[in-house]
Amino acid sequence: MSALFTPLSLRAVTLPNRVALAPMCQYSAGPDGLPTDWHRVHLGSRAVGGAGLILTEATAVVPEGRISPQDTGLWSDAHVDAWRPVTGFVAAQGAVPAVQLAHAGFKASTYRPWDGRGGVPDAEGGWTPVGPGDEPFLPDHRRPTALDESGIARVVEAFAVAAARALDAGFAAVEIHAAHGYLLHEFLSPLTNHRTDGYGGDRAARMRLTLEVARAVRAAVGERTPVLARISATDWVEGGWTVEDSVVLAGELAAAGVDLVDASSGGASARAAIPVGPGYQVPLAARIRRDAGVLTGAVGLIVEPEQAEEIVAGGEADLVLLGRELLRDPYWPRRAAAKLGAAPGWPDQYARAF
Ligand code: FNR
């Protein structure tokens, strides 16, 4: 009996197994952040491949919240219409379509990786980002405008409206992106939040924006829809955000209506010393799960079926998210199921091959 291929119920939604496609930017949106055939085929293939939860890439709640001009968004009814064929296909394969709602903060308006580095100028479709302050992330990034309190309120509202639109678009779950040095993490981390108003200073004040977003998203989607939150569980920098902070945040997120904490790390500082290796972030998920008593997802260099099985069976996390391995092999979940002795369950269309 495989723990990895056991269903997981979150509110009114049941994931058929514990394997998720990690959110990954595809830098392939059409004008104004509209998803394209690339997203339907890319996400659809991973659903055919057997992942139980299909997370979209970071999908911006406002235009200026895109990381690159080629990122997807969900800030208008046109986005709702464009996402419907994607979610419809994913759900028809028995997988759960989920959107990662995001605001890139001071890391917005950057080139997609194969077009260059640093900030995209206005002349090339870029824009002025916003952040907790007016310092750029790196010297080659654009200088942000510091959000004032009305700007912060608009961000919270934009997450809520996008979450409501996500349901219209056919998504069955929502993930709040509060990791990787993007806007919410910029407010959480003492490395990037130097505000002196009610959104900066001690940990409670730095958590305020993320918790306001979590409560607003929960209110927008109602009680039946799962809400996940991706956090950077540590900055990996002395004096930065720590896993102890994450345990406190996870408890507060749960109280705000978040059902599962997806434990990633890093992104707020280029100085971070990240001990990259197989399953290197799994201990973060395990620590949060144990000390905050919340469901967690583990991500980062999880590539072997037995490794993924061990994480779930050993109680380190409730879900594993695979990123690059699912880029290399969309059928990884079906192969893993066969290897772990669970029913591989290939689609009827492919049955004659097995
Ligand atoms: C990512 N990652 C990422 N994370 C996130 O929260 N939102 C995103 O949009 C993206 N985009 C993205 C694009 C690409 C091309 C890669 C490779 C990664 C991080 C990703 O979700 C995951 O956490 C890491 O890749 C580590 O997991 P793997 O790849 O080792 O399984």
Image (tube, helix red, strand yellow):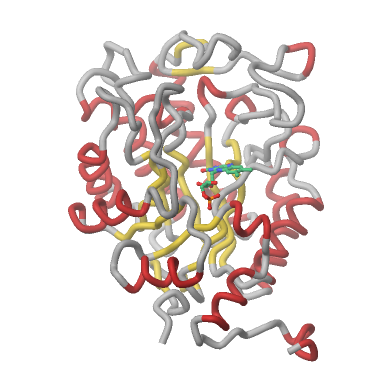
In front of the other: 239 or 163: 239
Q: How many marks?
A: 0
In front of the other: 165 or 320: 320
Quadrant showing the C terminus: bottom right
Q: Residue at position x 78%, y 16% from top?
A: 124
In front of the other: 115 or 68: 115
Ligand 1 in which quarter: top right
Q: Residue at position x 69%, y 71% from top?
A: 48
Q: Residue at position x 46%, y 19% from top?
A: 151
Q: Residue at position x 34%, y 57% from top?
A: 296
In this picture, residue 68 sits left or right of residue 16 = right
Percent coordinates x, y for residue 11 in the rendering? 39, 67
Quadrant of the rendered structure where residue 240 is? top left
Percent coordinates x, y for residue 186 in the rendering? 40, 25
In front of the other: 30 or 4: 4
Quadrant showing the N terminus: bottom left
Percent coordinates x, y for residue 134 in the rendering? 46, 8
Look at the picture and state if 48 lies above or below 348.
above
In this picture, residue 197 sits left or right of residue 323 = left
Percent coordinates x, y for residue 119 in the rendering? 65, 16
Look at the picture and state if 277 lies above or below 298.
above
